[in-house]
């Protein structure tokens, strides 16, 4: 379980004050206007931003002095998720061993993930040769191979076309069901996520303003 | 008429190109007028010339290699702490050693490493006697490291700045260690620019006139350009000067071709600004290493400057400045010639870029844009002393050189700094154009309004840096002013050089101090008042 209590950090126009609980295995959609503090919410959980006051616990463990590298969290960003000089295989392998020197069982695991993502024909392709959807699938592959419990998605599919976005959400749903990971996703088009997320958190000026059942989502909530 | 108006954007670039090429051709005409085959053959087999060529290449290669080897770990350590304002200020100051008039840097090196320098004094204090290692290869290498390491650090930091923040975060989440970060993030980002930087440093050391003139310590450690200067100014041996000039053109052309063939066209893709992360990648060992690197950086760049400032302050007095007409006259000419060259070079660079932008973005005629850019950089094959020699030979029978000397000096210095201003403004200018071109077209914003009201504010930082570099490089020139200067037209570098030559260290110190203050003022006004700092 992820628990934020009065987590406060100074942003440009306001001070955040996040208080919320997210259960293990849950899929939560974060919605809100630009500049509301959605990405900051993710950065706090990932450890990329340090709160001034408040407490953050993951599985009852205090995260205050836990660096980002020691948290069981992985992130998928809107862009720049991949190392451009590495191949598909290598980009997935960095999550297991950053020096890319894998043993046989690790190699097998990578090939299985590549196959699972339907990228076998591109195993040794360079990133520049992939489409936007393929790139995000490779990034997901890296996340699968990292075996982390929490996945943070920061508008990861906003640059893809609608069909591809749904396809990616389906893929994430499948991964979540198989690995029981907790997903927190900042989403630009909430209507598309209605069939996937367990609930929405509406963030406004650094606070979780409402906790919404996806069925209750309306555009005028903002 | 409509057709002419449609292509009027070609005009600025063409005029700029004609101005640059005219001066270069004038110089080449002067050099080739005195050239004959017998002379070249004679020179090629001359032992002295062969030794000079070998030494020129050897010292440039060694200087470039050492500069890169030292700059790389320093830059990688410095990058992690850039969120601290103090470090950013130190970095801006370290940049001084690259734009600093060379004579100041050389003087600073002498004050630290010279026979009467700080290190020598410390050695005497501990009973080891005076240290005498500054003249010759040691001094040349020390000076080249002092000047070029900050340049290399800046380029490395700039390359690292193009790494998206997301990749650093992925590295954190995937437990990259120091070596993984270097191999997977830093090295791929910097390797290309590192090679180009090494090549640029090589070419700068290849034509390092002032350093070798003062620190070479004699004919044994002379480079082609210094030998050329001696041939023309001391021996008045035009044949030898011309032959050395041709050799210089040939070798410099090869170097420039190599650099250009490895240089990608201006980077135009918008880059994500590196968001400084409070890295938890690093452990205590790394912190100690980084701290050590920061201390070494400060020692390399600030000890000489400190030695220089203390020495200058002790020699400084009201009388030595205001009751010394020669010094006041030098200050006047330094400012006049430096500011003129700086402003003109900036204007010419903008003229080049207006046409280059249109060729690349609107018409996609990349080869013509490259050709135009090449004409602005052509000066790289003709170092200032050589360019001046050619112009002198061309005009000496037609004009009274003394009368037109200021114009010649401004012209040569302008041409010399154009490659730098083009390089500083160019990539940002194209990037901004790519980002806003559609907007400019949509609202019909063009011409002078576009330049002054929109592009200039957007590019304030680049323009300010380019202006600072152009003015300070021009103010610091010693080669051209040595050829064309006189008792009436004398800049501070020439005044200092002549004072050193006549053993007036007090005069030289005051001159150095004033020149340093002028340069710092120009940089401060340009970078902090005119332009926003962009780290």
Image (tube, rainbow, N blue to C red):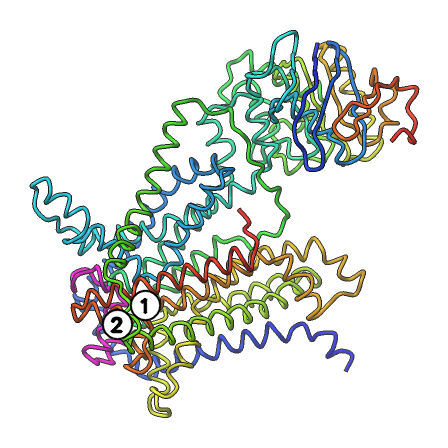
Q: Please tell me in which quadrant of the rendered image residue A180 appears.
A: top right
- Distance, label 2 to label 1, CA atoms, is 9 Å
| Highlighted magenta segment, given as a residue range | B213-241
Determine which residue is flagged by label 1: B248
In the image, residue B441 sits, relative to residue A18, either above or below, namely below
Q: Is residue A9 above or below residue B433?
A: above
Quadrant of residue B97 within the rendered picture? bottom left
- Residue visible at 32% across and 67% down in the picture: B248
In the displayed structure, B308 sits above or below A209; it is below
Q: Is residue B236 above or below residue A73?
A: below
Res. A115 image quadrant? top right
Main SS of residues in magenta: helix
Left or right placement of residue B330 versus residue A131 in this view: left
The tag on residue B228 is: 2
Q: Residue at x 79, y 65 (%)?
A: B444
Residue B274 locus on image (x, y percent): 57, 39
Q: Position of residue A24 (x, y in %)?
A: 73, 9
Residue in the picture at 83% in, 21% down: A200
**Outermost top residue:** A60
Q: Which mark is residue B441?
A: none
In this rendering, position of residue B463 left or right of residue B363: left
- Chain where mark 1 sits: B
């Amino acid at each position: 379980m992820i628990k934020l209590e009065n987590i406060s950090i100074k942003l440009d126009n306001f001070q955040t004050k996040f208080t919320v609980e997210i259960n293990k295995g849950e899929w939560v959609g974060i919605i809100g206007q630009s500049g509301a503090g959605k990405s900051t919410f993710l950065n706090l959980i990932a450890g990329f931003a340090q709160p001034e006051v408040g407490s953050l616990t993951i599985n009852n463990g205090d995260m205050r002095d836990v660096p980002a590298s020691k948290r069981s969290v992985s992130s998928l960003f809107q862009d720049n998720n991949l190392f451009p000089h590495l191949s598909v295989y290598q980009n997935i392998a960095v999550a297991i061993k950053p020096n890319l020197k894998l043993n046989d069982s690790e190699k097998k695991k990578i090939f299985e993930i590549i196959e699972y993502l339907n990228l076998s024909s591109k195993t040794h392709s360079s990133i520049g040769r992939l489409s936007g959807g393929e790139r995000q699938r490779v990034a997901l592959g890296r996340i699968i191979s990292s075996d982390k419990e929490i996945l943070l998605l920061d508008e990861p599919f906003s640059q893809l076309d609608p069909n591809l976005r749904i396809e990616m959400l389906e893929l994430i749903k499948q991964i979540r069901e198989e690995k029981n990971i907790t997903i927190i996703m900042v989403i630009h088009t909430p209507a598309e996520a209605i069939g996937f997320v367990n609930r929405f958190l509406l963030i406004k000026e650094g606070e979780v303003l409402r906790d919404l059942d996806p069925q209750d989502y309306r555009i005028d909530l903002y | 008429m409509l057709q002419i108006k449609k292509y009027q954007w070609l005009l600025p670039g063409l005029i700029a190109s004609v101005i640059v090429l005219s001066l270069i051709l004038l110089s080449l005409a002067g050099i080739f007028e005195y050239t004959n085959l017998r002379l070249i053959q004679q020179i090629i087999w001359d032992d002295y010339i062969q030794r000079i060529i070998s030494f020129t290449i050897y010292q440039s290669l060694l200087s470039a290699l050492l500069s890169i080897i030292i700059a790389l770990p320093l830059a990688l350590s410095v990058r992690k702490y850039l969120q601290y304002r103090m470090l950013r200020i130190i970095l801006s100051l370290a940049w001084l050693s690259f734009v600093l008039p060379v004579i100041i840097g050389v003087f600073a090196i002498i004050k630290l490493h010279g026979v009467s320098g700080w290190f020598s004094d410390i050695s005497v204090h501990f009973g080891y006697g005076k240290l005498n290692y500054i003249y010759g290869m040691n001094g040349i290498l020390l000076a080249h490291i002092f000047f070029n390491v900050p340049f290399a650090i800046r380029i490395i930091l700039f390359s690292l700045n193009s790494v998206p923040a997301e990749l650093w975060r992925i590295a954190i989440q995937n437990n990259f260690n120091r070596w993984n970060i270097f191999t997977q993030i830093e090295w791929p980002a910097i390797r290309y620019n590192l090679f180009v930087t090494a090549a640029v440093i090589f070419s700068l050391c290849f034509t390092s006139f002032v350093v070798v003139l003062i620190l070479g310590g004699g004919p044994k450690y002379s480079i082609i350009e210094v030998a050329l200067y001696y041939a023309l100014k001391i021996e008045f041996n035009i044949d030898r000067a011309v032959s050395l000039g041709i050799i210089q053109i040939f070798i410099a052309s090869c170097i420039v071709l190599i650099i250009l063939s490895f240089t990608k066209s201006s980077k135009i893709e918008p880059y994500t600004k590196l968001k400084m992360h409070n890295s938890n990648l690093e452990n205590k060992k790394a912190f100690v290493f980084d701290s050590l690197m920061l201390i070494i950086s400060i020692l390399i760049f600030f000890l000489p400057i400190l030695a220089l400032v203390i020495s200058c302050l002790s020699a400084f007095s009201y009388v030595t400045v205001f009751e010394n007409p020669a010094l006041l006259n030098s200050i006047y000419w330094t400012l006049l010639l430096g500011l003129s060259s700086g402003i003109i070079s900036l204007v010419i660079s903008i003229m080049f870029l207006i046409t280059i932008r249109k060729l690349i973005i609107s018409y996609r005629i990349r080869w013509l844009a490259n050709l135009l850019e090449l004409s602005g950089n052509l000066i790289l094959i003709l170092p200032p002393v050589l360019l001046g020699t050619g112009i002198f030979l061309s005009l000496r029978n037609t004009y009274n050189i003394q009368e037109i000397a200021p114009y010649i000096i401004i012209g040569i210095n302008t041409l010399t700094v154009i490659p730098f201003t083009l390089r500083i403004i160019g990539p940002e200018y194209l990037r901004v154009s790519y980002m806003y071109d559609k907007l400019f077209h949509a609202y019909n914003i063009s011409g002078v309004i576009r330049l002054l009201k929109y592009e200039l504010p957007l590019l304030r930082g680049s323009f300010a840096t380019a202006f600072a570099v152009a003015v300070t490089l021009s103010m610091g020139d010693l080669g051209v002013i040595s050829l064309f200067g006189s008792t009436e037209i004398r800049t501070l570098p020439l005044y200092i050089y002549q004072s050193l030559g006549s053993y007036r260290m007090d005069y030289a110190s005051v001159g150095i101090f004033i020149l340093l203050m002028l340069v710092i003022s120009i940089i401060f006004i340009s970078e902090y008042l005119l332009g926003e700092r962009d780290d």
